[in-house]
C-alpha cells in the first residue's frame, strides 16, 4: 500500500506539505525569538552606554572638585604672602570654565579677594563662615550636603557652592569658596549619543538633585529622597544599575549610578525603557513582514515542488551520476593546476621561488613599497668558487650545498621576506620595511655570517664556502626590479674584487658608512681602555632664581682620526653589539672621578645625573658597581643621580624595578627621563622609587603655540606635584618657554637658553662662580 502511495506521488506530496508547515512554524518562532532577543540586547546596550557616560562624568566631576584643593593651596599662599594677587586669578581667565567665580576670606570670615573683583560676596561669605567656624567641617564642603546651604533656583540651581578651610601650620587662617557650574560640566555631554528621553543627573548623598540634563535641557532642585526613587544614594556600592519608575514618568527608566570616590555625590545616567524599545519598532515590523513574505514563498515553493516531485524523482538518478563525473573531473583539473603552478614557480632543486616567481612577487612588493615609502633592499648573492666544488666533488655534492644555502636563507630572513634561486649558484633576496641604511647593512652582515658557516657532512664531505653579496636599494638605486637586480649584480662583483666573503652597496658612499660603523664597533673596547671617551656636562637651574642646582653628564667620543663623535652615532651601535653595559659602567666611573676631583678643589659640588641604559638596568651587578665607585672615590651617594627612560621597563620589568630600588637604598635620587615619549603610565610614577620627572623637549618646543603641548605640560606638572615629585623641563631654548614653565609651576629647567654642554674645565669655573652663570 505504501509503495503504491509513493508510486503515485501522494506520500511525497504529504511530506512536502508537512515540511512547509514545519518551516512556517519555525519562521514564526524564530521571528518572535529574534524580536525578544533584540529588545534584551537593546536594553543591555543602553545600560552599557549609560555606564560609560556615567564613569566619564563622575571622573570629570571628581577632577573639577579635586581642583578645589589646588585653588585652596593658591589661596593659602595668597593669605600668607601679604595678599599677592598674582597667586590666584579669575578661573574663566585661566581657562577653568567649571568655576564661575571664587573668593578668599580671612580668619574672621571677611572677604580678602574675589576673582570677579566684587567688594562683597554675601552668598560665598555665608558659606565660607559655615566651614570656617565649624569644628566638624570636612576638608571640602559642597553646598546642600553638610551646611544646609543650597541654591535650588530653577534657573541657576546647578551652580553649586564649595568651600575649603585654609590651614597654615595647625590653625585656620581663612577659607576658600567658589561656585562650580555643574551646568557647564553636563553641557559637555549634550551631544552624547544616548538617544532620546535620556537623563544625566548629579545627586547628593541625601537624595537631593543638584543638576539634571534631559535631552539637552538643564534643570535642578528636585527632592528625590522622599519619592523613594533615589534609595540607592544611601548605600555604599561604588556603582549599580537602575531599573525603576521615576516620579512623574509614565514608565520605568533604566541606567546606572556611579558614586564619586572621594566626594558625597552620585552621577546617574538613565533612559526611558519605552524610548529604547520604541526604536526597535520599525525593525520589528520589518521582521514580521519578512516572516510573512517568506512564509508565502514557502507555500508557493511547496506547491511547485509538489507538482515537480514526480519529475524530480525520475531525473535524480541521472543528475547524481552526472555530478559525480563532473566532480571527479574538477578534482583532476585542480590537481594538475597545482602541479603545473609548482613546476612553473618553484625551483626544482631548492624548493624556493625561481627567477619567474621572484620577478612576480618582487613587483608586488615594490608596488607596496611605493605606497609605504619605506626602504626596500635587493640582495644579489653568488657563492665564491662554487665551480671548484662542482669540479672537485661532483654535481651531486654541489646540489646538496645549494639546498643547504637555500635552507639557511629561509632561516636568516623574516617570514614575509623573499628569497629565490635565479640559476646556478646565484640567489636573490628582497627585504622590505627597513628603517635605515644601517638596518640593510645588519641584514647583509647576517647573511654573510650565516652562509659562511661550515657545511658538514655533504655526502661525506665537510665544505667551507663564502658568499659575495651586492646590495641595491629602492628607490635610490632604481624603481624596477630589473634595474635593482642589475645594479645589485654590479655591486656583487665589487664585493668579489674586495676580497670575497663580504657585501657591497651599489652606492659607494654607503659602503663608506658601513665601513665606518664596523670600524667604530671594532674599536669600542680599545676606546674605553685608552680613555677616548669623555664627559660634557649641562647644568639644570632652579625655576625660582635661575641658579644652578645640578648637572647632567653627557658622553662624547674623542676619536683620534674622526674627531669628536656625538652619542647619536655610537650609542645605537653599542646597544646592537653588546657594548653598552661596558660603556655605561665606564661613564659611571668617569663621573664619580670628576665629582671627587671637584671635591679635592674645595668646590661646592652639584649633583651629577648619569643616564642608565635598559641593558644596564637589567644587570643585577649595577648596584655593586655603583657602590664600589662611590667607595673608590670617597664621594657621597647624594651627589650622584640616576636617569632612566620608560623603555627600560619594557623587558623584564621586575628585574629593572629590583635594581632601581637597590640604587634608591644607596641614597641616590632617581629621575624618569623623556617622560611622555614612551610608554607613559601612572604605574611607573606610583610603583617605582622616582623623585623627579623630566618632561621631554618635544613637548617644550611649541609650548607657546600648541595648546595641546601646553595642556600636557601643565597636567604633568600638576600630577607630579600631587604625587610629591619634582618636575624638570628639558630643551628650554627661549625666554617665552621660561615664562610659560615658571607660570605653570615647573621646578627646574635645562636647555641651551641657560647653558650648552661643556667640558669639565668649564664646569669648574661655573662651580667657583655660580652666580656668573645664572640666567
Image (cartoon, rainbow, N blue to C red):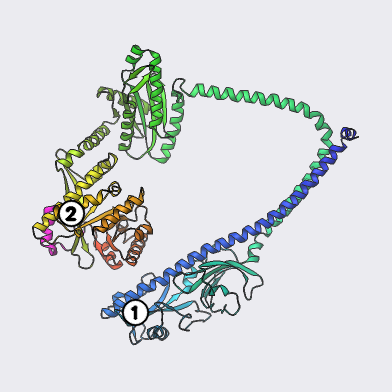
Q: Which residue is mark 2?
A: 630
Residue 648 screen position, x and y as percent: 32, 50
Residue 95 screen position, x and y as percent: 38, 69
- How crowded pointer 1 is (Cα within 10 Å; few <14, some 14-19, many 20+) is rated as many
Q: Is residue 219 left or right of residue 251?
A: left
Residue 569, by quadrant, is top left
Q: Which one is nearer the viewer's eye here, 564 or 634? A: 634
Distance from label 1 to label 2 (Cα)? 45 Å
Give the SS element for disc 2. Answer: helix
- Determine if residue 622 is in view: yes
In the image, which residues are magenta?
Answer: 753-775
Residue 527 screen position, x and y as percent: 17, 40
List the single residue furthest toward the right: 1
Label for residue 722? none
Q: Could you tell me which quadrant the C terminus lies in?
A: bottom left
Q: Is residue 358 left or right of residue 538?
A: right
Above or below — where is 734 with respect to 205? Answer: above
Amino acid at each position: 500500500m505504501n509503495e503504491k502511495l509513493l508510486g503515485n506521488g501522494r506520500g511525497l506530496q504529504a511530506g512536502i506539505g508537512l515540511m512547509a508547515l514545519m518551516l512556517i512554524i519555525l519562521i514564526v518562532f524564530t521571528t518572535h525569538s529574534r524580536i525578544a532577543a533584540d529588545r534584551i540586547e537593546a536594553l543591555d546596550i543602553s545600560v552599557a552606554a549609560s555606564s560609560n557616560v556615567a564613569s566619564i562624568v563622575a571622573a570629570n566631576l571628581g577632577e573639577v572638585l579635586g581642583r578645589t584643593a589646588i585653588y585652596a593651596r593658591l589661596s593659602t599662599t595668597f593669605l600668607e604672602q601679604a595678599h599677592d594677587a598674582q597667586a590666584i586669578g579669575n578661573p574663566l581667565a585661566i581657562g577653568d570654565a567649571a568655576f564661575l567665580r571664587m573668593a578668599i576670606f580671612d580668619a574672621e570670615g571677611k572677604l580678602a579677594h574675589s576673582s570677579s573683583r566684587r567688594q562683597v560676596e554675601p552668598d560665598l561669605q555665608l558659606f565660607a563662615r559655615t566651614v570656617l567656624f565649624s569644628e566638624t567641617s570636612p576638608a571640602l564642603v559642597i553646598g546642600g550636603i553638610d551646611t544646609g546651604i543650597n541654591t535650588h533656583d530653577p534657573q541657576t540651581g546647578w551652580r553649586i557652592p564649595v568651600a575649603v578651610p585654609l590651614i597654615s601650620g595647625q590653625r585656620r587662617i581663612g577659607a576658600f569658596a567658589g561656585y562650580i557650574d555643574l551646568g557647564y560640566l553636563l553641557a559637555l555631554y549634550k551631544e552624547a549619543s544616548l538617544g532620546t528621553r535620556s537623563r544625566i543627573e548629579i545627586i547628593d548623598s541625601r537624595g537631593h538633585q543638584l543638576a539634571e540634563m534631559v535631552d539637552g535641557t538643564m534643570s535642578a532642585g528636585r527632592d528625590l529622597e522622599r519619592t523613594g526613587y533615589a534609595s540607592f544614594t544611601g548605600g555604599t556600592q561604588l556603582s549599580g544599575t537602575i531599573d525603576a519608575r521615576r516620579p512623574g514618568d509614565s514608565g520605568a527608566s533604566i541606567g546606572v549610578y556611579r558614586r564619586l570616590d572621594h566626594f558625597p555625590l552620585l552621577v546617574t545616567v538613565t533612559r526611558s525603557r519605552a524610548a529604547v524599545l520604541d526604536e526597535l519598532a520599525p525593525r520589528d515590523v520589518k521582521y514580521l513582514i519578512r516572516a510573512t513574505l517568506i512564509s508565502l514563498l514557502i507555500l508557493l515553493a511547496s506547491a511547485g515542488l509538489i507538482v515537480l516531485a514526480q519529475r524530480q524523482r525520475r531525473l535524480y538518478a541521472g543528475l547524481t551520476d552526472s555530478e559525480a563525473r563532473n566532480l571527479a573531473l574538477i578534482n583532476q583539473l585542480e590537481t594538475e593546476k597545482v602541479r603545473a603552478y609548482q613546476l612553473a614557480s618553484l625551483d626544482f632543486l631548492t624548493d624556493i621561488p625561481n627567477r619567474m616567481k621572484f620577478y612576480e612577487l618582487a613587483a608586488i612588493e615594490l608596488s607596496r613599497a611605493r605606497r609605504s615609502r619605506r626602504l626596500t633592499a635587493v640582495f644579489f648573492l653568488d657563492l665564491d668558487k662554487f665551480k671548484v666544488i662542482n669540479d672537485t666533488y661532483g654535481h651531486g655534492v654541489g646540489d646538496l650545498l645549494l639546498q643547504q644555502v637555500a635552507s639557511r636563507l629561509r632561516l636568516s630572513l623574516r617570514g614575509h621576506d623573499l628569497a629565490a634561486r635565479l640559476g646556478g649558484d646565484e640567489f636573490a633576496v628582497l627585504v622590505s620595511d627597513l628603517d635605515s641604511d644601517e638596518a640593510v647593512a645588519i641584514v647583509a652582515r647576517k647573511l654573510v655570517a650565516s652562509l659562511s658557516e661550515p657545511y658538514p657532512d655533504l655526502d661525506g664531505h665537510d665544505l667551507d664556502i663564502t658568499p659575495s653579496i651586492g646590495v641595491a636599494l629602492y628607490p635610490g638605486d632604481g624603481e624596477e626590479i630589473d634595474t635593482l637586480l642589475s645594479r645589485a649584480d654590479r655591486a656583487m662583483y665589487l664585493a668579489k674584487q674586495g676580497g670575497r666573503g663580504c657585501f657591497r652597496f651599489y652606492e659607494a658612499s654607503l659602503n663608506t658608512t658601513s665601513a665606518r660603523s664596523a670600524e667604530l664597533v671594532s674599536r669600542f673596547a680599545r676606546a674605553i681602555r685608552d680613555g677616548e671617551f669623555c664627559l660634557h656636562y649641562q647644568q639644570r637651574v632652579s625655576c625660582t632664581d635661575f641658579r644652578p642646582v645640578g648637572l647632567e653628564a653627557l658622553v662624547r667620543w674623542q676619536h683620534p682620526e674622526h674627531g669628536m663623535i656625538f652619542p647619536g652615532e655610537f650609542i645605537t651601535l653599542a646597544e646592537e653589539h653588546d657594548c653598552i653595559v661596558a660603556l655605561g659602567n665606564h661613564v659611571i666611573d668617569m663621573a664619580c672621578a670628576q665629582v671627587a676631583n671637584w671635591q679635592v678643589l674645595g668646590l661646592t659640588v652639584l649633583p651629577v645625573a648619569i643616564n642608565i641604559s635598559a641593558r644596564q638596568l637589567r644587570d643585577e651587578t649595577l648596584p655593586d658597581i655603583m657602590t664600589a665607585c662611590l667607595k673608590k672615590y670617597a664621594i657621597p651617594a647624594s651627589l650622584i643621580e640616576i636617569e632612566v627612560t620608560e623603555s627600560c621597563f619594557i623587558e623584564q620589568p621586575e628585574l629593572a624595578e629590583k635594581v632601581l630600588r637597590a640604587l634608591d637604598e644607596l641614597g641616590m635620587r632617581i629621575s624618569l627621563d623623556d617622560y611622555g615619549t614612551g610608554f607613559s603610565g601612572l604605574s611607573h610614577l606610583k610603583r617605582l622609587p622616582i623623585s623627579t620627572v623630566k618632561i621631554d623637549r618635544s613637548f617644550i618646543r611649541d609650548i607657546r603655540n600648541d595648546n595641546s603641548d601646553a595642556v600636557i605640560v601643565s597636567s604633568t606638572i600638576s600630577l607630579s606635584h600631587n604625587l610629591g615629585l619634582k618636575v624638570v623641563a628639558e630643551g628650554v631654548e627661549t625666554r617665552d618657554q621660561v615664562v610659560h614653565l615658571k607660570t605653570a609651576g615647573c621646578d627646574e629647567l635645562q636647555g641651551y637658553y641657560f647653558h650648552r654642554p661643556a667640558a669639565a674645565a668649564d664646569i669648574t669655573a661655573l662651580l667657583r662662580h655660580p652666580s656668573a652663570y645664572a640666567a
